[in-house]
Amino acid sequence: MSQNANPRRSLLFVPGARLEILPKAESSGTDIICIDLEDAVADDAKDAVRAEAITAVADYTSQDKTEIWLRINSIRSTEGMADIIALAESDTAPDGLMLPKISSPEEIRILRDVLSTKHSELKFHPLIETTEGLKWAYEIAKSSHKIGSLLLGGFDMSANLRVEPGWKALLYARQKLVLAAANAKVDLLDMPFFGLDDPDNLKGESQNAAEIGFTGKCAIHPKQIEIINEVFSPSAEEIARAKDLISKYEAQDKAFVEIDGVLMEKPIVERLYHTLAIAARINS
């Protein structure tokens, strides 16, 4: 059983230039706070904001239930290289790095080599937002044991694909990421929903993402978190069903058996254990 499973149902972006709102973000109930050093920071402020964010991370990584990530700049840019060097030289690191515009598994291996010696627990979370990244998503997801999740960068992806960022137009990209993340056994977070005053469509898009295999969704405002968490949390019925099936499976000695209409084998059992681990962590 995955005793240390972390729920990654929701991720809330915090602009790197507005670190004063970190306490509000933490109180939202989000599973992940991601400090954005890329799109949310002007070019002439990146050096100062980077230093402030790395300092702020030291104060928040000790929180038990909320992961703290940094969204760094692309490692193909001077700003991204500066982000990596600063982290390599820092005594503290976030729980994870969101890596924008990742386009090859080799980029992940380079980051691993640079950062792993000093920050062995640091997880990588590639943001797949280019056609090149989508092409190599399967390999990127399997490129390192340090991969914790994949994320869909839907707006840049839609521009690359020459389509509008609607559900149908991005369905192929989403399904390809589902395959990559499921094969690597890592989490998969959907792109943000930008309708701040449209909770019904936020819930609908979240439900659609969950139905095809996403494990969570990104958010741009604290008021979106409750809906996202609800959609991606195991229901009371799912938890009870998982407990019942596991109990019956463990009471017999067959590796492959039908129980209450469910063909129980290793992948199914692992998924049920993961459901219970996530539920236990959410309720702890």
Image (cartoon, rainbow, N blue to C red):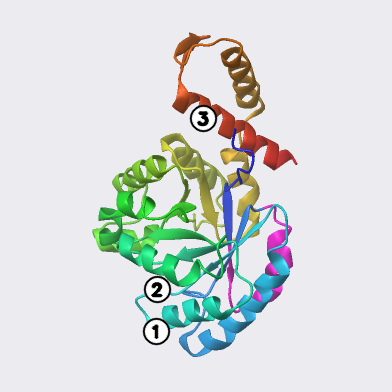
Residues marked 1 and 3 touching at CB (< 8 Å): no
**How far across and down, in percent of the image, does residue 202 sit?**
52, 47
Residue at screen point 62% across, 44% down: 229
Q: In which quadrant is the N terminus drawn?
A: top right
Task: State left or right for residue 53 relative to residue 142.
Answer: right
Foreground of the two, 111 or 176: 111
Residue 101 in sight: no
Q: CA distance from mark 1 to mark 3?
A: 42 Å
Residues marked 3 and 2 touching at CB (< 8 Å): no
Residues marked 1 and 2 touching at CB (< 8 Å): no
Q: Kindly identify which residue carries mark 1.
A: 78
Q: Nearer the viewer, mark 3 or mark 2?
A: 3
Let me know if residue 254 is in the magenta part: no
What is the secondary structure assignment of the residue under circle 1?
Answer: helix
N-terminal label among 3 and 2: 2
**How far across and down, in percent of the image, does residue 142 sit?**
37, 50
Residue at screen point 73% across, 39% down: 283
**How far across and down, in percent of the image, does residue 174 sit?**
36, 46
What is the secondary structure assignment of the residue under circle 3?
Answer: helix
- Label 1 packing within 10 angstroms: few (<14), some (14-19), many (20+): few
Residue furthest toward the front? 117
Is 147 above or below relative to 181? below
Q: Nearer the viewer, mark 1 or mark 3?
A: 3
What is the secondary structure assignment of the residue under circle 2?
Answer: loop
**How far across and down, in percent of the image, does residue 271 sit?**
51, 30
- Label 2 packing within 10 angstroms: few (<14), some (14-19), many (20+): some
> On the image, which quarter does residue 68 sit in?
bottom right
Residue at screen point 45% across, 39% down: 208
Q: Amino acid at mark 2?
A: Ser
Q: Kindly identify which residue carries mark 3.
A: 270
Q: CA distance from mark 3 to mark 2?
A: 35 Å
Foreground of the two, 212 or 263: 263
